[in-house]
Amino acid sequence: MRTKALLSVAAIAASAITAMAQANVYSLNIVGYATVTVNPGYNLLANPLSAGATNGANEIMPILDGEQILTWSGASFSTVQYDSGAVPTPGWVLGDDTTPAHPPSLAPGQGFFFFNPNATATNFTFVGQVVPGPSSTNSLSLAPGYSLVGSPLPASLTVAQGGITNAPLHLPILDGMSILQWNGSAYVTTLYDSGAAPTPPWVKGDDTTPTTVPAYTIGSGFFFFNPNPTAAAWTQSLP
């Protein structure tokens, strides 16, 4: 998945400040947008901005006939798809392509698989509020075992910038944790193992080959494995 961050707040903020000053109304919300390139087939995504009444799939992204959205329950996937030819009720249906369904809610921080049925890549532009807002803190619970997540805060970090565990993303580091990212056909696994040989702590899925902390791009989802019996908090904040 190729992602291009296009958070654009200056013009919006300037006009909003002028209007609010005249009305004597103040707001700390930041509005932005991010354009994500969705390739044919399965993409592992996460909604980077809060938008709409419920952050429903019909509110935050274009609807493609034949698309599928797979959400993770903690143990298995649930599939909802859009099929204009579904019988007896066209539109949103479950994975059986028959039972009527509602478009799933996809709040910031929740990862999901999106199946693009088209033969060419499609650009999705997410529009909404940055979470958390200024002077606020966001905390996402990472349950024991596998969670399908994405950064609630819309930011990208390369390996050279310190990767996903660096500020402002601040993914917590747990000894024994795993990060599974999707390359379009398979998972790429990165482990943090303080006892890995020959070179701890970041290693590939074989628990031996040295690697680097994973990078992160806006709009991407990934599996996080928490090896502990209790939940961990993924905390992010803006000054």
Image (cartoon, rainbow, N blue to C red):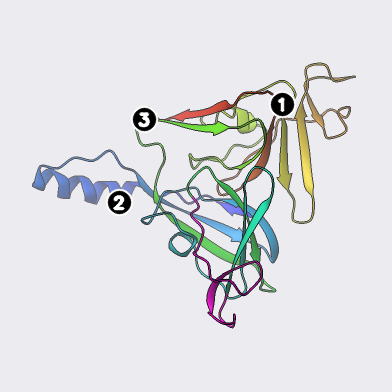
Q: Residue at x 36, y 37 (%)?
A: 133
What x and y, as percent, mark residue 143? 61, 32
Which type of secondary structure does the marked residue at label 1 adopt?
A: loop
Question: Which of the 4 quarters of the picture holds residue 191?
Answer: top right
Task: Say if mark 3 contacts mark 1, CB within 8 Å.
Answer: no
Q: Is residue 39 left or right of residue 237?
A: right
- Mark 3 vs mark 1, foreground winner is 1
111 up-or-down from 179: above or below: below
Q: Is residue 161 visible?
A: no
Q: Is residue 42 left or right of residue 61?
A: right
What x and y, as percent, mark residue 81? 60, 68
What x and y, as percent, mark residue 113? 64, 55
* Picture quarter with the N terminus: bottom right
**Label 2: which residue?**
12
Amino acid, disc 1: Pro
Which type of secondary structure does the marked residue at label 2 adopt?
A: helix
Quick one: label 3 or label 1, which is nearer the N terminus?
3
Q: Residue at x 79, y 56 (%)?
A: 185
Magenta: main secondary structure: loop
Q: Which residues make up the magenta segment? A: 83-106
- Front position in the image: 54 or 235: 54
Q: CA distance from mark 3 to mark 1?
A: 29 Å
Amino acid, disc 2: Ile
124 up-or-down from 6: above or below: below
**Label 1: which residue?**
227
What x and y, as percent, mark residue 63? 52, 70
Q: Residue at x 59, y 32 (%)?
A: 142
**Label 3: which residue?**
136
Q: Is residue 208 visible?
A: yes
* Picture quarter with the C terminus: top left
